[in-house]
Image (spheres, rainbow, N blue to C red):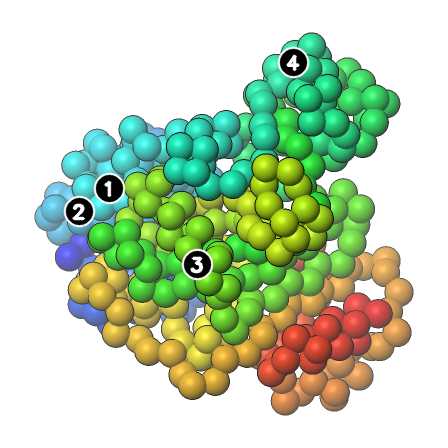
Amino acid sequence: MNFIFISPHFPHTYWQFCDCLKKNGINVLGIGDSPYDCLENPLKAALTEYYYVNSLEDYDQVYRAVAFFAFKYGRIDWIESMNEYWLEQDAKLRKDFNVTTGIQSDRIGFIKEKSLMKQLYLKAGIPTAQQSIVSTREAGRTFVEKVGYPVIVKPNIGVGATNTWKLENDCDFESFFDNLPEAPYVMEEFIEGVICSYDAILDAQCEPLFESMTVWPPVMDIVNKDLDLMYYTCPEVPEELRTLGRRTVKAFGVDRRFVHLEFFRLTKARKSLGKIGDFVALEVNMRPAGGYTPDMMNYAHSTNVYQIYADMVAYNCRRQAEGPEHFYCVYASRKDGHVYSHNHEEIMNRYSGNLVMQEEMPPMNWPQMGRYMYTAKLLSFEDAEQFIRFVQG
């Protein structure tokens, strides 16, 4: 089996996908814009061959790389980047090389466009916030009159919380439309709730081989208000979220993927959506959760999601069991310019038995992920809260 991995060096933990695929006897063929000598040694060891391109943005270069691998190794069975930014290009490559695994070009719009996502949510009867495309000031006013302030505005196609704002009054509204970007925007009613993700690895029948829940803060506030990031992966998945997650992936018709679906867990009842504690769909991301979250899932569930994914590719089943102990795995970060009560040495001394990761993040991640991160696994929610307060207080 020939598996082409686009950009296997980013995020750098993705070498583990390559390593587990290789262990299952799969040819892992990398295409990336980082010179081979700059790749980490574990990734080099996992790749059968690597093809360097000057830019992954240049489709012709990437096409030629895939064509070279097809000529040298035969039929290509998989093409994946597991990166939101390249999903559309991945689909185009699959079409051009007749690769039937993965999302196809005729489905990519429902994966990337938030307005089309809503259509599938509504068709499947999955609770979701009201939304409208707001290409004009008049359309925005009509929507605000319908749902009231505050509202959220964000690009119809976009990754994370980039260029996302909360409009709380007419002043915010006018300022937004006075500087309206060219990209299409959507406006949504504001939902008071905690963001919870349903993360799953799906087999060829769209059935989950692995499921997990991670609780997130509003990333929009982390970036726009320069706050410290904390989030955590839970030891168990609530049954309501499990049910809605499974319904969502079937509604979107995706299979053989690692997915990251975002929901609100209501902290305030909302007419037509639900009561406090209910889950409401936010958006889908047909790739793994970002950063070190897959590793946090491993620590929370005492398992190896990289191997589960590789077994799905090779055997369409799960061979990696979960250990008996489950934990809260908590990520807490620090930013430059913030004042903290405890220094690095105090954190390391107090939580040396719990810490599973600690490092300085790459500069490009500082606005969202913080400059320094500490990740620990803890037995209870109360212990998790205490850890966050100690690191960030």
Question: Which amino acid is tagged 1?
Answer: Val
Going by the numbered disc 4, the residue's amino acid type is Ala
How far apart marks 2 and 1 lie (CA) works out to: 8 Å
Q: Which SS class for mark 4?
A: helix
Q: Earlier in the sequence, mark 4 or mark 2?
A: 2
* Spatial separation of the CA atoms under disc 1 and disc 4: 44 Å
Question: Disc 4 designates what residue?
Answer: 139
- Residue 66's label in the rendered image is 1
Answer with the quarter of the image where residue 385 lies. Answer: bottom right
Asked whether, in this view, residue 266 is left or right of residue 302, the answer is: right
Instruction: Kindly state the secondary structure of the residue where label 1 is placed.
Output: helix
Q: Secondary structure at mark 2?
A: loop
Q: Considering only order in the chain, which callout, 4 or 1, is on the residue closer to the N terminus?
A: 1
Q: Which mark is residue 76?
A: 2
**Residue type indicated by callout 3:** Arg
Given contact means CB atoms under 8 Å apart, are the residues at marks 2 and 3 in contact?
no
Image vertical order of residue 300 relative to residue 53, above or below: below
Q: CA distance from mark 2 to mark 3?
A: 33 Å
- Please provide percent x and percent y for residue 281: 52, 44
Q: Residues within 10 Å of mark 3 (few under 14, many from 20)?
A: some
